[in-house]
Image: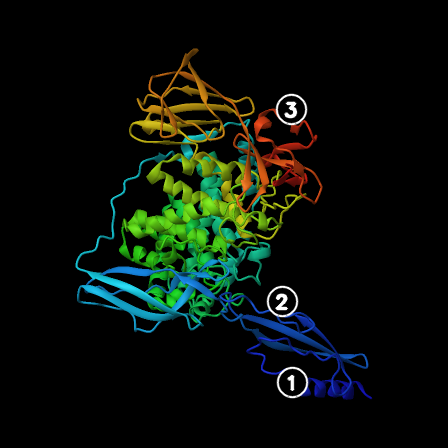
Amino acid sequence: MSEQETRNQIQMDIDSLYLGNLKTIEFDLFLPNEGKKGSKISWSSSDERWLNNQGKVSQPPFGRGNREIKLTATFTLHNEQLTHVYDVRILEAPNDIKIKKIYSIQLIKKENETFYLPTGIAVESLDGKVVTQKVNWACNEPLLLAKKGHYTFSGTIYSTDYPVEAQVEIVQKLTRYSVRKKKKSLFSLKDVTLDKHSSFYKNQQNYLQFLLSVDDDQMLYNFRKTAGMDTKNAEEMIGWDSLHSRLRGHTTGHYLSALSLASASTRNVRINEKLTYMVSELQKVQTVFSKKSGYQKGYLGGYPEIQFDLLEKLHPYPEVWAPYYTLHKILAGLLDAYHYTKNKQALEISKKIGNWVYHRLRKRSYKERQAMWGMYIAGEYGGINESLADLYEITGDSIYLEAARFFDNDYLFYPLEQEVDVLGGLHANQHIPQIVGAMKLYEASGEERYYQIARFFWESVTSNHIYSMGGTGDGEIFQQPNAIASHISKNTAESCASYNLLKLTNALYQYEGTTDLVDYYELALLNHIAASPARDCSGESTYFMATQPGAQRYFEVENSCCHGTGMENHFKYGEFIASYTEESIHINLFLSAKIMAKELGVDLTIDANLDQGTMVIKNRSTSTRQLKIRLPKWTSSMTFSSDGKPQKFALEEGYYVIDQPFEELSITFTLLYAIVEAPDDPGLCSLYYGPYLLGGLSEQTNFLSLDFSEEDLQTQFQKNQTIRQKKTGVEFIPVHQLDNESYHLYFKKDV
């Protein structure tokens, strides 16, 4: 048989093979290994998570969207081969939820004002899980009711027959706004300098060297390439920014933010030059896009605008991968350049992006936008609502505030308004930045619902969804409340999730000023953020902070989300060390630093030695503000001496009030050992020394069983270079000092 005859036989096998309707796959496929003419057939799937090479189908969970798979068949006969690719759509699993309770839906609306019923509500399933469900309402929306009174609207849980009712009260007057003044202000990063001997300064310097080594033209590669411009012989980006990725450009946004923060924190001239170049070149790219066919004026991105078109048509992930998320990183980076370095070019680019977003989304209906934001990954938009609200505050142009509101996400926001924790099952860092944006929307608009959403979310996460280092999420996903011990794994606690939780904590603190917010900030900063960077100048950060026994820190060189936020994190240490009011300065974190804010008359030097339990504050301020020093929960008390004389000070709202002038204040305190039990298993606990989470050094892959008898916990350990438990000999170090060691964060209590 000739070569061509063999190929014809193979083609006949290809033509005669029918696999069925591949556009609606819910069951396993039969994949034959031989054709009718004798060809041997082998199979290869583009994504074996959903369709493996033997035809086994795993439907994506309900709400995660369908999956488009390339199934490749290789036909072989007499040493000749032909391939054929089948396009397979795996349908998401049906909504098989069994509902025990639907939380009450009660709305108050103003007469003669249009409104919509929430598209997402809280329910409790028969197995006790509290989750969000989408709703199909029977009425036509938007609604406008002219008469005061009570109204009832009916609908069903999406893709089920469960009935839903919404009770709506129409009133003549409705107060939606509050006047809540900020209680604390934070010092500018340029006014805070870290002590050169601290590990935090070392982290900062490592990342400074990394930023200085980055090729700016490589960071601009995707933008110039997409716009058809000269890429200046730069190398392509890798990982999430490679040419095949639909997130390309997001790292450049983080890079802009990192340069801005580094410029403020280190005042490095070369960093500012790099930032100026990046902004100037991005403006050129934006100008080219504005003249390019198929692009709307103001667009700026590292991939074609068609990604946004496909999202509006509800194309799922991975065909669409979070275009507004990537745009948010770019916009946030430009706004950081404006805030930290007064770069007016960056603001002009930002305004054009804001206009582009507004004009695009105002053409989409409320329901269309809700459908987009409810999509798994594809509809992820980062915190672009935060950036747009920020743009409104800068410019006063109301279209940016309206554009920010376009990103209100009922699927998350309304259950939080109900004060129901529905986070279990949601992608953690898809939703945390949305709440950061809600907080910024409150700041920009004064609309009280945004504040209440943000506050309840923060309380829910920090009370019920936090691992011992302050991070959250297993496999990037929030679990049900207090499910910690049952989710100890390699893939816990994305560092980018903690980055955003700290942003939210920071924003809430400025309005509330309470020590519970500082306690969480300290926990996550010292034990997750400071534990995340590589110990060299590679610029890498841990993606997950593994919690399973015998874990090690590991790094993925792929321009991931955590690489991006990691570039920023270590230039932000100075922003929360202290805060101030008209009357006082509050020391929040015990980090060694100098705070010099000439316009405020503040000149303080903090020399904190936590290992020795001492802190010295030197005061050269001309300001008459009182000094207030936080009493951390990890020590029982603090003693003071001012200019060599013992002093006693009153404790008010968690801060010692230093009510007399001083030049040098010496403080001593005792760091206590403490154990904190996992909420779902009291037999599993973590060990702390003062503010530091301790990692037990062991390669053992089973939980270490240790006796942590409460009555003598403070005498169980000997502290030298490491902390050693006397009875067992197990050594511990603070997790922010971990390098390549195998460690344990959770231990079984030996009782």
Looking at marks 1 and 3 on the same chain, the residue that comes earlier in the sequence is marked by: 1
**Quarter residue 727 falls in:** top right
Q: Report x, y in % for residue 233.
A: 58, 55
Q: Nearer the viewer, residue 373 or 323?
A: 373
Q: Report x, y in % for residue 119.
A: 37, 65
Q: Is residue 29 left or right of residue 566?
A: right
| Coloring applied to the structure | rainbow
Which residue is rendered at x = 38% and y = 27% of the image?
A: 655
Q: What amino acid does circle 3 point to?
A: Asn
Q: What amino acid does circle 2 point to?
A: Asp
Alpha carbons under labels 1 and 2: distance apart: 21 Å
Looking at marks 2 and 3 on the same chain, the residue that comes earlier in the sequence is marked by: 2
Which residue is rendered at x = 28% and y = 51% of the image?
A: 447
Q: Nearer the viewer, residue 310 or 29?
A: 29
Looking at marks 1 and 2 on the same chain, the residue that comes earlier in the sequence is marked by: 1
Q: Is residue 701 above or below residue 366?
A: above
Q: Confirm whether residue 511 shows in the render.
A: yes
Q: What amino acid does circle 1 point to?
A: Tyr
SS of the residue at dot 1?
Answer: loop
SS of the residue at dot 3?
Answer: loop
SS of the residue at dot 2?
Answer: loop
Q: Is residue 732 left or right of residue 498?
A: right
Alpha carbons under labels 1 and 3: distance apart: 71 Å
Which residue carries the number 3 mark?
720
**If the image is split into quadrants, where does the N terminus sit?**
bottom right
Which residue carries the number 1 mark?
18
**If the image is split into quadrants, where does the C terminus sit?**
top right
Alpha carbons under labels 2 and 3: distance apart: 51 Å
Q: Nearer the viewer, residue 3 or 327?
A: 327
Q: Is residue 715 above or below residue 341?
A: above
Q: Which mark is residue 47?
A: 2
Q: Confirm whether residue 257 shows in the render.
A: no
